[in-house]
Image (cartoon, rainbow, N blue to C red):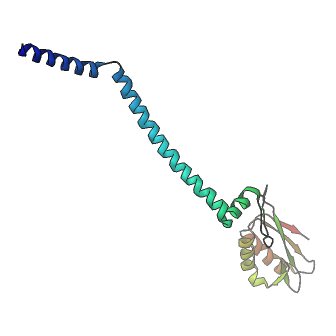
Amino acid sequence: MRLAAVLVFIGVVLGAIYFVFSHPAQDRLEELERELQQLQAQNESLADENQDLERQILALRDDPRVAERRAREAVGLARPEELIFQFDEPRQETSVQVRLQVGTEHLELAGRVVELPDLAEQLQILQEQIPQMTLSVTVDDDVGPIERQRVIDIVEESPLGPVRWGD
């Protein structure tokens, strides 16, 4: 009788164990536990985001520098003593015309008097300062042919773009 009771007890325990681990609700329980872990991770992420937003709200409310920076960025505000410069992109490069006036007494390049020996150097400097320039050369009628040819040679040897020759 005792043996029968022990065997029944073992059978009941094994049946309960089998029922618990093979029950269809066990799969659902594991699925719900995974979903719970995902929701807890999402909740932590949202809590961190809420803390960041709360810090930003406090900074906007309590720190006038942050509020000022936001207003400047959003609306383009400026302080009373500030000047705001806005530059548009040029649609095309503009060419600057520089004038070289050759006279009997002196040479005048871009409104400045230069000596003939210094002309090549001055043209180079001007070209570096104003790369999109074009040169317009005017030679007075009284200039001798030798001086005229020296000016022509210097101008043609310079790295300038198109040169417009006038009389």
Left/right placement of residue 111 relative to residue 33 reads: right
The picture quadrant where one finds residue 29 is top left
Compare residues 123 and 70 and report the one nearer the observer. 70
In the rendered image, which quarter contains the N terminus? top left
- In the image, 151 versus 51, the foreground residue is 51
Relative image position of residue 10 (x, y in whole percent): 14, 19
Considering only vertical position in the picture, is 110 above or below 16?
A: below
Return the residue found at the far front: 1
Place residue 122 in its image quadrant.
bottom right
- Relative to 101, residue 53 above or below: above
Quadrant assignment, res 28: top left
Number of numbered discs present?
Answer: 0
Q: Is residue 41 left or right of residue 98?
A: left
Q: Position of residue 154 (x, y in %)?
A: 75, 75
Q: Position of residue 109 (x, y in %)?
A: 82, 78
Q: Is residue 102 above or below residue 75?
A: below
Residue 46 relative to residue 159: left or right: left
Residue visible at 75% across and 70% down in the picture: 130
Point 49% across, 42% down: residue: 43
Q: Percent position (x, y) of residue 27?
A: 35, 23
Q: Quadrant of the C terminus?
A: bottom right
